[in-house]
Image (tube, rainbow, N blue to C red):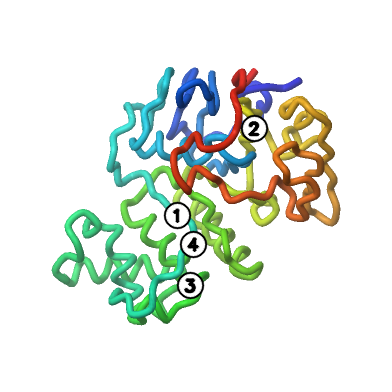
């Protein structure tokens, strides 16, 4: 049974930008994951999937310096994690702006430069040129001066990609960025992220409840469940025998017309048509250990 990083020897040639070493995260008696060894290399696209409360969003919080590991270490570009590092880009869940929000598209993207710390900065020719370049890179030039409250969810999410790229990141964290988007915008935003990671040689950690929109883009999958995990290529991890051992109960993985369907997961998501356990991760709703059960860590 392949486990940990030994599961796949087909790593990209890029240099590691992020490294977890024997890392564990627990809240009280509940272990979200333990003994995690993971290197994210420049240009590598890793999807993070799994059950409710399995520690996906908590992992992003650790990388952002908002949550401390219980044990082990995590490094970014060879140094300990520091909160507020602009070279770590972050794309949140899609959330529509309220009507009347007084921000234009270019203002939202511009906050990713330095303005997010102190409010919207005074305009300058140099900053405007930077914002114009970012708008162009994410295909949003046409609505750069439009209020974000007048834009669709997919258009707003394009802007959040641009904002995340403003700090010239080496690593891009994507926290359910396709949630609530229709299929066309899921495809467009996924392809935009994939295009930018290839052009900029970005490492990408992509948390998602559905692997299918990014299945053809993903290099490796990190699957979290019940305090344990598996890491490898989609073909190595998304298999009936691997997930059955991970969950400790029978799980069927069905492939049909280029899609993956997982049936029989014990978290109440059996038969989800989109390919992985369906959920709204409870880590977004409160304390990160609000769901899930104790586990024995990865093997």
Q: Quadrant of the C terminus?
A: top right
- Between discs 3 and 4, the one toward the N terminus: 4
Disc 4 target residue:
94
Disc 1 target residue:
92
For the residues bearing labels 3 and 1, Cβ distance under 8 angstroms: no
| Residue 135 drawn above or below residue 287 | below
Q: Is residue 242 visible?
A: yes
- Between discs 4 and 2, the one toward the N terminus: 4
Q: Secondary structure at mark 1?
A: loop
Q: Position of residue 279 (x, y in %)?
A: 63, 49
Q: Residue at x 78, y 45 (%)?
A: 270
Disc 2 target residue:
225
Q: Position of residue 230 (x, y in %)?
A: 66, 28
**Between tags 1 and 2, which lies in front?**
2
* Number of numbered labels in the structure image: 4
Q: Closest to the observer: 216 or 254?
A: 254
Q: Closest to the observer: 95 or 174?
A: 95
């Amino acid at each position: 049974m392949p486990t940990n990083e030994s599961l796949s020897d087909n790593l990209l040639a890029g240099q590691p930008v992020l490294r977890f070493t024997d890392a564990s995260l627990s809240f009280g008696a509940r272990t979200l994951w333990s003994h995690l060894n993971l290197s994210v290399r420049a240009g590598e696209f890793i999807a993070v999937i799994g059950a409710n409360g399995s520690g996906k969003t908590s992992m992003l919080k650790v990388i952002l310096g908002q949550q401390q590991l219980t044990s082990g270490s995590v490094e970014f570009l060879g140094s300990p994690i520091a909160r507020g590092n602009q070279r770590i880009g972050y794309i949140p869940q899609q959330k529509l702006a309220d009507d009347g929000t007084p921000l234009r598209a270019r203002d939202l993207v511009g906050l990713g430069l330095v303005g997010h710390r102190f409010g919207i900065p005074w305009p300058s020719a140099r900053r405007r040129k930077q914002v114009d370049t970012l708008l162009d890179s994410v295909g949003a030039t046409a609505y750069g001066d439009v209020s974000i409250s007048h834009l669709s969810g997919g258009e707003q999410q394009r802007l959040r990609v641009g904002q995340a790229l403003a700090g010239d990141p080496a690593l891009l964290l994507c926290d359910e960025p396709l949630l609530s988007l229709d299929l066309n915008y899921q495809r467009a935003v996924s392809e935009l992220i994939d295009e930018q990671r290839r052009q900029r040689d970005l490492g990408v950690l992509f948390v998602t409840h559905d692997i299918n929109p990014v299945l053809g883009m993903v290099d490796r999958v990190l699957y979290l469940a019940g305090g344990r995990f598996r890491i490898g290529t989609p073909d190595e991890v998304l298999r009936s025998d691997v997930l059955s051992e991970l969950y400790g109960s029978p799980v069927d993985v069905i492939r049909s017309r280029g899609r993956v369907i997982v049936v029989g997961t014990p978290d109440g998501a059996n038969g989800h048509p989109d390919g992985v356990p369906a959920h709204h991760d409870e880590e977004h709703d409160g304390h990160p250990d609000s769901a899930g059960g104790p586990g024995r860590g990865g093997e």
